[in-house]
Image (cartoon, rainbow, N blue to C red):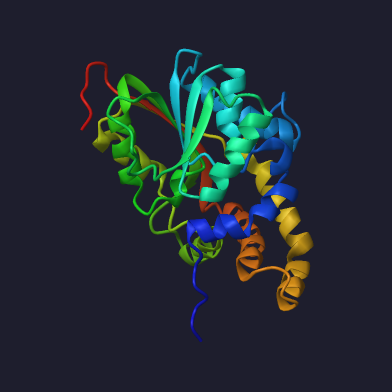
Amino acid sequence: MSRKKDPDIQAYYKATRWDYRWVWGVRSTYALHYGVYDETATHHQAAVANKNRVMADMVGITSEDRVLDAGCGVGGSGIWLATDRSCEVVGITPVEGQVRDARRNAARAKVGDKASFLVADYCRTPFEDHSFDVVWALESICHAPEKADFYREAFRLLRPGGRLAVADYFRLSRPLPNDGEQLIRQWLRPWAIPDIDSEAEHLGHARSAGFVDLEFRDITSQSMQSVINLWEHGTRWLWAAKLFHKLGIVSSIQVGNVEAVIYQCEAMNQGLWKMGLLSAHVPVGSPPK
């Protein structure tokens, strides 16, 4: 029996647009990402906004900064940054439908003058050297086949003294023990994620690109509620997704999307991955590589 073909990133986000809007609340939050739960953010809408705040504070984003949102989704972080930090944001994604949604969302939020969006690959952008003060990547590097390519491009784009802010999934080791690699693949591939790197691998990529002052923060405990929320959605609706697929109402990509949230939670319960934040700087006076 041949294995079902894995979706590419454009096919995945096109097929699951409705799912994110109505199950994950994207129609109101504009956020595809997980939340950071704490005493100030105890529900989903507050937690996803809180993650933006935590990342922005991590690298000190102000109104003076020009920010590249690398993997912008439907514009949630860019809109938050333009609204809360009054900075200029350029969001990029390879998914044309997301750019259209992001532009509409920015106009609705009345920040279209500060937040712009276009189709581009964050590993090979059309921007000139030294174009940005901050490169921001919120749960997006995971989609890169080679994470090192992202770090090299981010370093090229940042001005001397520029900052990098990353939030992503990090595997605990390579290889993972027992059947860990198989379980991770069962989660990642339906989400069009080729693989996830470890903390050490990410830090190594950043150092090789030229970044300094690297810091890593484990936020797994603050992200766990998002994982649980997804698991609850998945276990509640998988039967319906499979039935609707047989009836021709939903696609195999949508069924895989639901199955993946269950595998992801299983992988976290087995200690195979963690959620983390990474920050770094370009040395002052350092030319791009």
- Give whichever of 140, 22 is nearer the camera: 22
> Where in the figure is residue 256, as x and y percent of width and height?
61, 66
> Where in the figure is residue 22, as x and y percent of width and height?
75, 49
Please, is residue 161 above or below residue 261 in the view? above
Q: How many marks?
A: 0
For the point 70% across and 48% down, which residue is it? 21
In this orientation, does residue 207 appear?
A: yes
In this orientation, does residue 33 appear?
A: no
For the point 54% across and 65% down, which residue is it? 186
> Which corner quadrant of the image does residue 15 belong to?
bottom right
Which quadrant is the C terminus positioned in?
top left
> Where in the figure is residue 242, as x and y percent of width and height?
72, 72
Going by the image, does 282 lie left or right of 40? left
Going by the image, does 208 lie left or right of 39? left
Please, is residue 7 above or below residue 223 in the view? below
- Give whichever of 30, 201 is nearer the camera: 30
For the point 58% across and 52% down, which residue is it? 268
> Where in the figure is residue 130, as x and y percent of width and height?
29, 24
Going by the image, does 80 lie left or right of 196? right
> Which corner quadrant of the image does residue 30 belong to?
top right
- Give whichever of 94, 5 is nearer the camera: 94
